[in-house]
Amino acid sequence: MADKIAKLVIEGHDPIELPIYSGTLGPDVIDVRTLTNHGYFTYDPGFMSTASCDSEITFIDGGKGVLLHRGYPIDQLADNCDYLDVCYLLLHGELPNEAEKSHFDHIIMHHTMVHEQLHDFFSGFRRDSHPMAIMVGVVGALSAFYHDSLDIANEKHREVAAHRLISKMPTLAAMAYKYSIGQPFVYPRNDLSYGGNFLHMMFSNPCEQYEVSPTLARAMDKIFILHADHEQNASTSTVRLAGSSGANPFACIASGIAALWGPAHGGANEAVLNMLAEIGDESHIDEFIARAKDKNDPFRLMGFGHRVYKNYDPRAKVMKETADEVLAELGIHNDPLLKIAARLEQIALEDPYFVEKKLYPNVDFYSGIIFKALGIPTEMFTVLFAVGRTPGWIAHWKEMISGPYRIGRPRQLYTGQKVRNLEK
């Protein structure tokens, strides 16, 4: 039942009644699905005023700087849970008890290996291929290897596919990196944490032992948590749209990776490092700040402000603390780009121009700093975003597939030629 009724009055027509529904949190929504019965549909480029679905997974209040997963604030999850706790929460709706956690952690960490033939896929790519190009291909290719989890109508198949994707995504990401630098692939270790295992696969080699720092492993875990889900963003909406056609889960996640690749979405933290490199030296900061304030200058400060958050990005506070821990652990004090970043952060938090416009440092700004400090190349930044976002994509895909759904079919406002005939 509708909570309220809206009446749309169009000149020359009887009023159209449209039901209004209230969610648990957030603004009410007007149900416009019956408009087509009256010969109309809405026009909303970018879908900024359109709810494409109802969901119980994530809530964002950009004005207040709120991000909740299943009701839990993101900072509480980052401070008190590990990444696999958050994966379980997104997939199942509740945090795991001790027995559930032990079982879930065992499943994920004992399915991290990929089929040996997948190694052959990498040789088909050029060594200088962007790792995201590789990820789109190899994640989609998982559907060619795991035929026993492709029946989307089978709840057990959906669960197995979810576990496989979360387990194997870090392995594939590390393989993409190793391939790009000509080093042998490193097999996962089941005795390490999720974040620690990823660092092991990235930075160890057969010639010497790699000791995983607990501080860095925990930092990696927090980075994954902070990227785990973000409501109906471009990549998540892409996964849902692909899933609405009945596509298999591996293909759906590959479509999400493709959408994430864009610099306006997952590529933002890579753009932060490119910006720091463009500035080049602390002595140039004032010049670039002036350019950022100039409306006629195309230069933009990357990593400041957010399309959704009109307040401080709630993930940024946790990411800043993590960045400080990582830099302290690694003893990094004199890196030129990190010095530029520290100065830009100070300016953004103190300069009236940035404060008034609420252009605070966001999660991409700090994650870029952390990845730089860890020695992760910029082209891998978006890949790590994809690894972290995987459980969110899967949770939304499962939520949609588990209930009644229709294939997505957005409409358009046609502005092309009217009917015309070919002249003989």
Image (cartoon, rainbow, N blue to C red):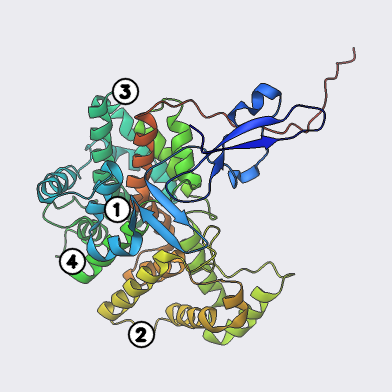
Mark 3 or 4: the one toward you: 3
Q: Amino acid at mark 1?
A: Ala
Placement of the C terminus among the 4 image quadrants? top right
Contact between marks 2 and 1 (CB within 8 A): the answer is no
Q: Amino acid at mark 4?
A: Val
Contact between marks 1 and 3 (CB within 8 A): the answer is no
- Cα–Cα gap, marks 4 and 1: 15 Å
In the picture, the disc for residue 53 is: none
Contact between marks 2 and 3 (CB within 8 A): the answer is no
Label 1 crowd (10 A; few <14 / some 14-19 / many >=20) = many
Label 3 crowd (10 A; few <14 / some 14-19 / many >=20) = few
Badge 1 marks a residue whose secondary structure is helix
The residue at which mark 2 appears reads as 333
Q: Which residue sits furthest top?
A: 424
The residue at which mark 1 appears reads as 174
Task: Using the image as rendered, state which of residue 242 and residue 12 is in the foreground.
Answer: 12
The residue at which mark 3 appears reads as 153
Between discs 2 and 1, the one toward the N terminus: 1
Total labels: the figure holds: 4
Label 2 crowd (10 A; few <14 / some 14-19 / many >=20) = few
Between discs 1 and 3, the one toward the N terminus: 3
- Cα–Cα gap, marks 4 and 2: 21 Å
The residue at which mark 4 appears reads as 212
Between discs 3 and 4, the one toward the N terminus: 3
